[in-house]
């Protein structure tokens, strides 16, 4: 049943590979818990007390509330699927509620630190330097996800309209405008890449001409961010947070930022407004006579 559920998520819901892996891991952990604790082999026999016991066990193991809530969401989605396919007659997750989790604000790089990163750090003029610079510039200039970055192809770049076509979650396409500077950077990079490796299927490649892989991008971003910032998280997603925060700090409309990020709901984008509000409060405290 779990295999059928995962295929449903992959082919009908079009979930990303990362999400599928998370769902599979959650369900494998749950089935192992059922077998070891209750000697149960079939997930369709589960009742509410079994679910609650697992949640309690996770809490006692010190798992963070946010991680537990993701597992709860997995269970809810799984049993909703079983109910819809009539494998079960009642949904055991009906009374299962998410835990109260502390809201964590997105980490982001300050504007002056991004200036230091992109305008003052010396990048080598060889292929590696051009590619590394392009990785950082694209992540910050477009706010695209790591998976979207490594899957970019030459055909996705429209130099005449200064835009980039991105294939996001659930295969949803969106166009992101970019600057003439990025277009020039892309042109220079592709010329050098084609000389070294010939034309490639994917825009960004390794030093051997192969498609980029996630860990390489992580290492690249971390390497350069360590030179300009002391924030604890130094990942590609931090540059996505930075993109959104800086746009809102400069007065961009929330709906526009939502569309650029590829969010399906405004709620996902609103998390960045807190950082913008903190900046407004700081300006108020410094400038208003009655502050």
Image (spheres, rainbow, N blue to C red):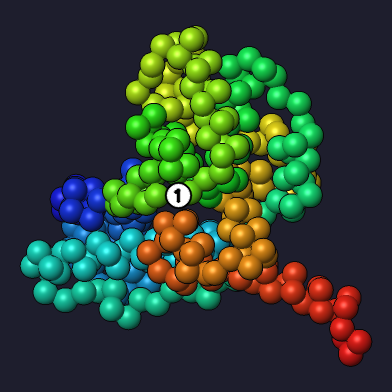
For the point 47% across and 42% down, which residue is it? 162
Q: Is 22 left or right of 94, judged from the image as shown?
A: right
- Image location (x, y in percent) of residue 177: 48, 49
For the point 75% across and 44% down, which residue is it? 115
Work out whether 210 lies above or below 83.
above
Q: Is 59 left or right of 169, judged from the image as shown?
A: right
- Asked whether 245 or 191 is in front, the reply is 191
Work out whether 210 lies above or below 47.
above
Mark yes or no: residue 263 visible. yes
What residue did someone put label 1 on?
176
Q: Locate the C terminus by quadrant.
A: bottom right
Quadrant for residue 228, please give it. top right
- Image location (x, y in percent) of residue 283: 81, 74
- Asked whether 101 or 166 is in front, the reply is 166
For the point 61% across and 23% down, which residue is it? 130
- Asked whether 196 or 89 is in front, the reply is 196
* Disc 1: CA contacts within 10 A as few (<14), some (14-19) or many (>=20): some
- Image location (x, y in percent) of residue 248: 62, 65
**In the displayed image of the protein, which residue is found farthest to the left?**
86
Work out whether 249 lies above or below 211.
below
**In the displayed image of the protein, which residue is found farthest to the front?**
160
Badge count:
1
């Amino acid at each position: 049943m779990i295999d059928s559920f995962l295929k449903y998520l992959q082919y009908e819901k079009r979930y990303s590979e990362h999400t599928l892996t998370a769902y599979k891991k959650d369900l494998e952990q749950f089935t192992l818990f059922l077998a070891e604790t209750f000697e149960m082999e079939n997930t369709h026999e589960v009742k509410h007390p079994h679910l609650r016991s697992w949640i309690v066990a996770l809490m006692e193991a010190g798992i963070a509330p946010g991680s537990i809530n993701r597992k709860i969401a997995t269970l809810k989605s799984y049993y909703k699927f079983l109910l819809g396919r009539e494998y079960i007659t009642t949904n055991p997750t009906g009374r299962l509620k998410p835990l109260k989790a502390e809201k964590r604000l997105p980490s982001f790089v300050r504007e002056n630190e991004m200036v230091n990163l992109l305008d003052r750090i010396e990048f080598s003029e060889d292929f590696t330097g051009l590619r590394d610079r392009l990785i950082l510039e694209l992540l910050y200039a477009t706010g695209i996800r790591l998976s979207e970055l490594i899957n970019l192809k030459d055909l996705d770049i429209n130099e005449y309209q200064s835009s980039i076509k991105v294939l996001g979650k659930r295969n949803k396409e969106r166009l992101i405008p970019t600057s003439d500077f990025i277009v020039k950077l892309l042109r220079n990079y592709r010329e050098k890449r084609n000389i070294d490796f010939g034309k490639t299927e994917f825009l960004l490649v390794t030093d051997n001409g192969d498609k980029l892989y996630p860990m390489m991008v992580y290492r690249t971003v971390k390497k350069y961010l360590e030179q300009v910032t002391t924030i604890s998280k130094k990942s590609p997603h931090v540059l996505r947070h930075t993109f959104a925060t800086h746009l809102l700090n400069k007065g961009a409309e929330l709906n526009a930022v939502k569309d650029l990020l590829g969010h399906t709901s405004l709620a996902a984008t609103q998390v960045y407004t807190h950082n913008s509000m903190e900046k407004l409060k700081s300006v108020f405290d410094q400038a208003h006579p009655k502050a």
